[in-house]
Image (cartoon, rainbow, N blue to C red):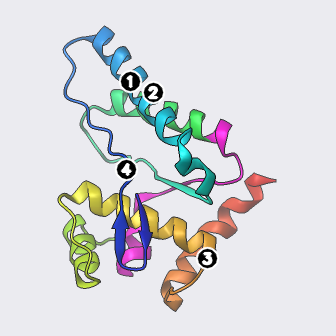
Amino acid sequence: MWVQGNEVKFHHIIKMGPVKDWREGVYRIRAIKDELAYVLYSEVSLYIKCIVLEGYSYGSRFQSHQLGEVGYMFRDYLLDLFPSKFYVVPPKTLVKFTTGNGNSKKKDVAEKLQSMGIELPTSHHYDACSAAMFAQGICTREGLSKPQIAVLEKYLGRNERFRQ
């Protein structure tokens, strides 16, 4: 997903259903990695300037082991392909960037983006849109409010030293 002005663009959405056992879980992770490879090795990879992945919400209670396996597989893969363009941003940082308040709820993120003319089907899409907007901010800094620039600079100041 990426943002051009107030328009949200999708290249590819990966959807997978529930798994029945651990083997099916492994096959699912492989399938997700294959889908990710398809997107990253397609023509869209020529235009990648920055990738932002939402970090874990450590307070989450459901399927944490499976999410951890998939999340770290993504991180490993993206870090290998795009070491200087890849960022993992904590959820509260993305929420603060989008709404101005790091303690805002998912509905607040959706309402803020809707007020900007962005309509999406689920809260997960709104989260992804926040990450896409953060990535756009890292790349261009154009059209950002002073509070958004402050959030971005605080995040980058904390994390850029690890990129060298």
Secondary structure of the residue carrying numbered label 3: helix
As shown in the figure, which amino acid type bears the numbered disc 1? Ala
Q: Which corner quadrant of the image does residue 120 belong to?
A: bottom left
Q: Residue at x 33, y 33 (%)?
A: 64
Residue range in magenta is 79-102
Determine the CA span between mark 1 and mark 4.
24 Å
**C-alpha span from label 1 to label 2:** 5 Å
Location of residue 124 by image quarter? bottom left
Q: Mark 3 points at which residue?
A: 140
Q: What is the crowding at mark 2: few (fewer than 14 residues within 10 Å), some, or many (at least 20)? A: few
Proximity of marks 3 and 4: CB atoms separated by less than 8 Å: no
* Labels 3, 4: front one: 3
Relative side of 129 to 18, left or right: right
Residue occupied by mark 4: 57
**Separation of residues labelled 2 and 4 (CA atoms):** 25 Å
Disc 4 residue crowd, few under 14, some 14–19, many 20+, Cα 10 Å: few
- Please report whichever mark, 2 or 4, sits nearer to the chain's N-terminal start: 2
Asked whether residue 93 appears in the rendered view, the answer is no
Nearer the observer: mark 1 or 4; the answer is 1
Identify the mark nearer the N-term, 3 or 4.
Answer: 4
Closer to us: 43 or 148: 43
Query: Which element is circle 2 on?
Result: helix
Q: Which residue is drawn at 39% across and 29% down?
A: 32
Residue 80 in magenta? yes
**x and y, in percent, of residue 79 in the image:** 64, 41
Residue on which the image places disc 2: 34
